[in-house]
Image (cartoon, grey):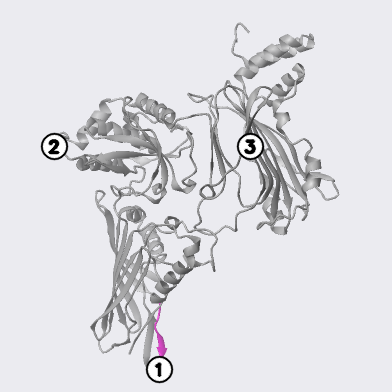
């Protein structure tokens, strides 16, 4: 021990030695020394409890006889949509005073249909590190037991039948490092797709530190009591109905069902100051950073507006560097030094954001990092202090107004905000340690952003029943990112194939791309313009001497997929469906000489709340017409109660886009 004072294995051996000498007191001392340094040794912890002759505090929380509970509650008769009932979900935690968490979980499923068998016959608890699975079995109706086949925490349940019960019981321990090694936070979903007969969440805290908690989307009573002198918090609820069947474009569960948030941290300021310290520790104005500044501002930054400075730094980063995330290269939280990002020309979100605020500080531009949890996680995913962010961006001030900048997409024009940031959760990180800003969580909505536009102009000629089109596609802001990336493809055939796929997915007709006339862009511009020559594959139909064809369209603001349901139980999160602010489509159709249009649809204008749509037809000559379509969708939520009216609006829009033209 003198030579290896920190050796954990030696402490176990010392304990084992004293135990053989029947000196339990010394054995316990050495075992506990190991536990202080290795919190996740479940077997050793149980051994210490046995040696001390005390009952494990976690055992006092558990439901006492799960087999008796199963027999009492199976054939529950609960209504479900997916063939599974949850008879019991039990989550018990112990938060150790020296850091680390012990978790015990029990979940008991009842299978009520073939659908349920299919969904649960293969199951993974997703455990890693140190864990013990004490039960993974089928309890048959005759009370016989069939163990699951297991590999790690993955399991297969063979011979499942309707009426069977699956019984899972397991424990795990884990701990973290760094400033928050003594802290814990998590979110527990109470209501989901399967009904629950009985739900428990219990938390024992060894220390006197309070546990902060919040229930969203409902109320669940909390009980506080002592377990072996330790403060215990309990949330229990019976007969939790399942939500209705899942629907496309519905809100995240965390935004509509009961969730319990817990955290040992009181204030978001703790998180923002911690990350501010991490970032500042990496910022050094080394030669590479000074050279980068001189490249961006060869004549200095004096006299330049905030907008000019922000755009110059943005263009430099998105033009010069490539996004990369490799686990051994980029750490979880700590950004690279700006000089390393510059030298390697690689970085992730926090690396680019740190480089931006460094250059912004050198050019007297107000800028801070913002930690982000992207919008796909839901607006209620974070309520109490936590480090569970998955992205990092920059907030700067331009003429006194907030401007958020995404730096990882080199094809994204300046001031464009991608859909993943719309209604994302953000926490601003002060660049200056002495900044007195309020460190509050916020939802990034109504952010200043360049409007995303999708505009097309098509000139279609009809000759000998063949359709040719010259199409110009003009995209602005966030909608242009993918098309700008296609324009950079060096393989011409691959570029043509990818461009065809992109355009055809947004069209009502099929075609071959005969020629790409233009597919270039200026990196510092706000979008891209692509010109193509197309051979439309559709042919006109014949009614006697009259020819008919359906109007070819090259954008699709409203489609059948958004109104596929007969009725809806869930609201439509429209921003998950739509990412474009406006569509403008101009189509000119010219027949060959001697032909003329004899049937032209009527113009229409339609509105639903903040959604507007219009289609107008104008005869330029007997053989030439012009069609103009303007669509302005709203990204606001469509409530389930509004679905019928919204569906009628979309159906009317689609009807105007399925009209036929006739000529002879």
Residue indicated by mark 2 = 303
Q: Is residue 12 magenta?
A: no
- Image coordinates of residue 342 in percent, x first then y, are 31, 33
In the image, residue 539 lies in the stretch drawn in magenta:
yes
Which residue is more in the foreground, 530 or 187?
A: 187
The quadrant the C terminus occupies is bottom left
Q: Residue at x 34, y 82 (%)?
A: 601
**Residue ID for mark 1:** 544
Mark 2 secondary-structure assignment:
loop
Number of marks in the rendered image: 3
Residue at the disc numbered 3: 127
Which region is colored magenta?
Answer: 538-544
* Image position of 614 with respect to 423: above or below: below
Q: Looking at the image, do the residues carrying marks 1 and 3 touch, with CB atoms under 8 Å apart?
A: no
Q: Is residue 345 visible?
A: no
Point out residue 173 in the picture as x, y percentages from the top left corner.
Answer: 63, 29
Q: In terms of sequence position, does the residue under pointer 2 or pointer 1 come before the other?
A: 2
> Compared with residue 624, is residue 35 higher up or lower down, i.e. above or below?
above
Which circle, 2 or 3, is nearer the viewer?
Answer: 2
Task: Residue at 50% x, 63% y: name it.
Answer: 641
Q: Residues within 10 Å of mark 1 (few under 14, many from 20)?
A: few
Q: Is residue 198 above or below residue 493?
A: above
């Amino acid at each position: 021990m003198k030579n290896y004072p920190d050796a954990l294995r030696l402490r176990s051996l010392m304990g084992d030695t004293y135990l053989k000498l029947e000196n339990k007191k010394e054995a316990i001392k050495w075992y506990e020394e190991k536990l202080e340094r290795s919190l996740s040794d479940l077997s050793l912890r149980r051994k210490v409890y046995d040696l001390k002759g005390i009952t494990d505090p976690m055992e006092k929380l558990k439901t006492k006889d799960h087999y008796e509970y199963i027999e009492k509650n199976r054939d529950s008769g609960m209504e479900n949509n997916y063939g599974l009932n949850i008879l019991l979900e039990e989550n018990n935690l112990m938060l150790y005073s020296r850091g680390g968490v012990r978790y015990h979980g029990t979940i008991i499923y009842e299978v009520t249909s073939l659908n349920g068998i299919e969904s649960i016959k293969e199951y993974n608890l997703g455990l890693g590190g140190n864990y013990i699975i004490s039960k993974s079995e089928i309890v048959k109706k005759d009370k016989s037991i069939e163990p699951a086949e297991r590999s790690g925490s993955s399991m297969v349940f063979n011979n499942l039948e309707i009426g069977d019960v699956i019984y899972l019981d397991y424990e795990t321990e884990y701990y973290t490092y760094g400033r928050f090694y003594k802290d814990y936070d998590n979110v527990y979903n109470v209501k989901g797709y399967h009904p629950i007969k009985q739900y428990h969440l219990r938390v024992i805290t060894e220390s006197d530190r309070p546990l902060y908690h919040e229930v969203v989307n409902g109320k669940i009573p909390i009980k506080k009591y002592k377990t072996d002198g330790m403060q215990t918090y309990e949330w229990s609820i019976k007969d939790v109905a399942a939500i209705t069947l899942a629907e496309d474009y519905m809100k995240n569960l965390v935004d509509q069902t009961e969730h319990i948030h817990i955290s040992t941290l009181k204030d978001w300021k703790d998180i923002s100051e911690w990350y501010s310290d991490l970032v500042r520790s990496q910022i050094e104005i080394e030669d590479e950073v000074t050279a980068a500044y001189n490249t961006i501002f060869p004549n200095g930054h004096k006299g330049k507006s905030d907008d000019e400075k922000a755009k110059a730094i943005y263009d430099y980063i998105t033009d010069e560097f490539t996004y990369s995330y490799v686990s051994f290269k980029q750490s979880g939280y700590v950004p690279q030094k700006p000089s390393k990002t510059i030298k390697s020309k690689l970085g992730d979100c926090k690396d680019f954001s740190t480089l931006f605020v460094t250059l912004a500080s050198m050019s007297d531009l107000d800028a801070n990092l913002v930690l982000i949890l992207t919008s796909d996680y839901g607006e209620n995913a974070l309520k109490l202090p936590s480090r569970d962010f998955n992205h990092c961006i920059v907030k700067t001030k331009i003429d006194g107004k907030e401007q958020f900048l995404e730096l990882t997409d080199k094809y994204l024009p300046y001031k464009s905000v991608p859909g993943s940031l719309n209604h994302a959760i953000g926490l601003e990180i002060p660049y200056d340690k002495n900044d007195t800003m309020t460190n509050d969580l916020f939802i990034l909505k109504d952010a200043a952003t360049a409007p995303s536009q999708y505009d097309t102009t098509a000139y279609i000629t009809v000759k000998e029943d063949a359709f040719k089109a010259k199409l110009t596609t003009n995209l602005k802001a966030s909608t242009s990112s993918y098309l700008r990336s296609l324009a950079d493809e060096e393989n011409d055939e691959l570029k043509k194939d990818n461009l065809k796929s992109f355009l055809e997915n947004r069209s009502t007709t099929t075609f071959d791309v005969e020629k790409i006339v233009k597919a270039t862009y200026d990196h510092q511009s706000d979008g891209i313009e692509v010109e193509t020559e197309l051979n439309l594959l559709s042919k006109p139909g014949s009614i006697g001497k009259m020819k008919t064809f359906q109007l070819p369209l090259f954008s699709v603001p409203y489609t059948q997929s958004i109104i596929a349901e007969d009725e809806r139980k869930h609201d439509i999160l429209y921003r998950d469906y739509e990412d474009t602010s406006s569509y403008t489509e101009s189509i000119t159709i010219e027949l060959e000489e001697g032909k003329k249009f004899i049937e032209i649809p009527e113009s229409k204008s339609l509105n639903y709340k903040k959604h507007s749509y219009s289609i107008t037809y104008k005869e330029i000559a007997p053989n030439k017409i012009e069609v103009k379509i303007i669509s302005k969708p709203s990204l606001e939520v469509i409530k389930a109660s509004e679905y019928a009216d919204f569906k009628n609006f979309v159906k009317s829009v689609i009807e105007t886009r399925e009209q036929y033209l006739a000529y002879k």
